[in-house]
Amino acid sequence: MAILKRRHFLMHSSAAAAAGALPSNIRKALAVTPNNRTGTLNDVEHVVILMQENRSFDHYFGTLKGVRGYSDPRAPILPDGQSVFSQPDGKGGRVLPFRFNVAHTSSACLGSLDHSWKGTQAAWNEWDTWVPHKTPMTMGYFTRQDIPYYYALADAFTVCDSYHASLFGPTNPNRLFLFSGTNGLAVGQDGKQAIDNVDDGNWSADMAHDKPDFTPFTWSTYPEALQKAGVSWKVYQEYDNFGDNPLASFAQFRNLSRSSWQYQNARSIVPGSSTETMKETDGHALIKAFERDVANGTLPQVSWIVPPAALSEHPNAPPGYGEYLISRLMDIFVTHPEVWKKTVFILNYDENDGFFDHVPAPVPALNAVAGFTDVSTQGEVYHGETVGLGPGVPAIIISPWTKGGWVNSELFDHTSVLRFLEQRFQVEVPHLTPWRRSVCGDLTSVFDFSQANPDWQAHLPDTATYLEETRRSCKLPPPLVPVVQTMPVQEQGQKPARAIAYDMTADWLVSATTTTLVLHNIGLRTATFRVSLNHTNTRHYTLRMGSAVRIPVPHRHGQTVQVYGQNGFYRFFRTGLPLAMTLRHDKEKSCMVLDLTPLSSAPDFSTVTVNEAYSQQTLLSQRLTARHPESLVLAVKPGTMWYDLTINSAATHKLLAQFSGHCENGIPDWTDPAIGQPHQ
C-alpha cells in the first residue's frame, strides 16, 4: 500500500474547519443553488460515480444520528435469544461491536478479513455466524471521531441506510453489477466470475499487461449502451487502479486501438500517471485530470472514478486517505459551481469485506421451504444458491438536490445506480433480473428537484487534527476486542427522512383449528419480508404491489412469530390465542385502525392492555369478549408517523403481539425517534 506523504495532507487540510463548523468545501457546496431549469430529474446533467472498497454500513455509520444502526429498536433476535449485535464466537463466548479507535490503534490499516462468496444461504440464514467466519475483527466500527469528513458529508447531504451490496461476496462480481447490471447469471454465464474475483491478474490500468490466455467476458456492458445512445461517459483511472475497473475483463475492451472510443473512454490512463509514479501515488494525476475536464466544460454526462489502491479504502488503506480523495474532488466541484449545480456525485462501496452489518440481506426464496416470491428468480441463482443481495454498505448521494442531512431507507443495491442513469438518460439497463429490478429502487426517491435551494444548517466538530492522526495510525498497536464489552452508543436525535413508497401489512387470523399469517403488499414498491418462528427457521418473502401470501403457522401455545420488513416494519405474534389481530393505515382519514377480534367460540379474555411506546400512552385496558371486538383508531400526522403498539396480558404482563413501523404517506418525515435511545 502506498503511504501518502504528510505534506499532501497538510496542504489540503481545507476539510478541517473551526470547531462546530462544516469543512469549508462542504459549506461552499451547500451554498450553490441547484440547476432548477425544469424542476425535474432532467436538471441533472452529470453523474459521477466513485465506488470504494470493502466497508459495511454499520462499520462506518452504525453510530451516525438517525440511521438504522447500532441502536436499531427493531434489530433481529438470534435463535439463542440474544440480540444480533451479540454475535456468538463459536467457542461459547460472544463478541459485541467495538470501536476501531484510530487515535490509539492501527485499525484504519487493518488487513482484509475473509470476504469470499457466502457459500450457502443456510450458513447465513440466521445471521449468527459472523465471528466464526470472519474473526472477531468483523465487529469493529468507526465513529465520527475516526472518519469525521464522511460524517460531515452524511450530515450535509443524503445517506442511504438500506443500500446493499449486490451479492454476498467479493469485489469483482459486485463491480460487474455496477458496470453491466449482472454478474453473468442473467445472460446464462454461470462460471466462477458470478461469485468470485475472476480476472487476468493485471491489477493496473495498462492494457499492455493484459494476459492473452485469459478468457474474457462477452456480455454487453452499460457503458456500451450509453455509447450507443449518444450519452457521453468515461472511466477516470491512474496507472494503478487496483484492478477495480471491470471493463478490462470484457472482450470488447481488450486488444484495442488507442484511438478507439473503447480505449479512450474505458482503458486510457490519466496524464501524469505511470509505472514510475504508481508506488507512491496520492491520486494527484487522477484529481488533475478530473479537474481539467470540469474546468474545460468537457466532463462527460456519466463518469466512473476508479481510485488507486492507497485511496481505495480497502481495509489496509486507511479511510482517511479516501476522505482525502473525496475532499479534493469536492474542492473541484465548489471551485466550479456552474458544473456542480447540475451534478450528482454518488459515493458507494462495492462490498462489506468481512465487516458486520446487522440487517440480514434480502434474498429471493427459491422454494417453499425458503419462503415465497411472486417475482421471477431467473438470473439470481448460482448452482442452487440464491445470489443476492449482500450485506449493507455505505452510500452517500452528494448533490445540490440532496443536501440537508437526509436519510433514505428505500432498498437499493449497485444496480440502483444504473437504474438512476436509466431514468435520467432513458437508456435501459439490459441485463437486470426481474427480481432485482422489482426489489431494488432507482435512487430517485433520494432527490428533491422541486425546491431551488432548501435551507439547511448543522453543527459539526472540529476535524483539524484528524489528518495528522491518520498519517500516524498505521504505526499504532493493532485493535483488540475489549475485555469488558459494551454496546456502542449511537448519536441521539433524528434526521429528516425522505418519503418512500412502502405500505405492507401482516395480519394474524385465527379459527378454531388454524392460525394464519397473511402478508400483504399494498404499497407502490415491491416489498420483502423475513419471517421467523421462535427467532429461527427464517424464511424470505417477496411480494409485488398488490400481492398477498397466506402462511400457516403452528396453532399450539408457546410459539412466537416475528416478521421484519423495510424501514423498521416489525410484527410479533404469540401463538395459541383465539384472537385475530390486524392493523391498517387509512391514508384518506390519516389514521391507523387496530382491530382485535376474539373467536366467537372463545371464552372471554382476561384483560389486555394496548400501549403505544412513542406517545407513551395506554390506549386500551379492558376485557375482550367475542361479542365485543375492539377497534382502535389512532390519528397519525406529519411528525408522528412512527408507531409501536404492544398488546400485553394484564395478568401475566406477557407480550402477546407487537405492531411497529412507519406510516408512509408520500410526505417527508423524520427518522425513527427510538434510534439513539439507550439499549434496554
Image (tube, grey):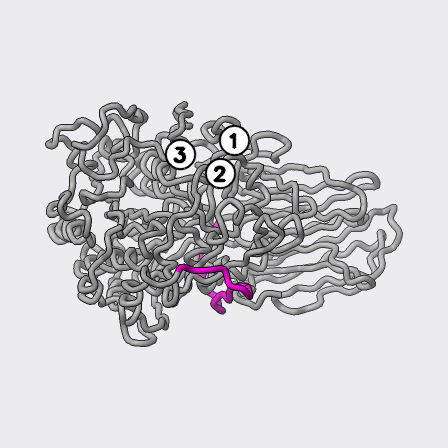
SS under mark 2 = loop
Q: Quadrant of residue 303?
A: top left
Q: Amino acid at mark 3?
A: Asp
Q: Which residues are magenta?
A: 478-500
Mark 1, other Cα within 10 Å: few <14 / some 14–19 / many ≥20: some
Alpha carbon of mark 1 to alpha carbon of mark 2: how far? 10 Å
Which residue in the protein does label 2 denote? 118
Identify which residue is drawn at 32% across, 49% down.
52
Residue 250 visible, this orientation: yes
Mark 1 element type:
strand
Nearer to us in this view, 578 or 425 = 578
Residue under circle 3?
196
76, above or below 421, in the image? below
Q: Residue at x 47, y 52 (%)?
A: 138
* Residue topped by disc 1: 385
* Sequence-wise first label, 1 or 3: 3
Horizontal side of residue 162 vs 397, given as left or right: right
Image quarter (top left, top right, bottom left or bottom right) of the C terminus:
bottom right
The percent coordinates of residue 327 (x first, y second) are 25, 60
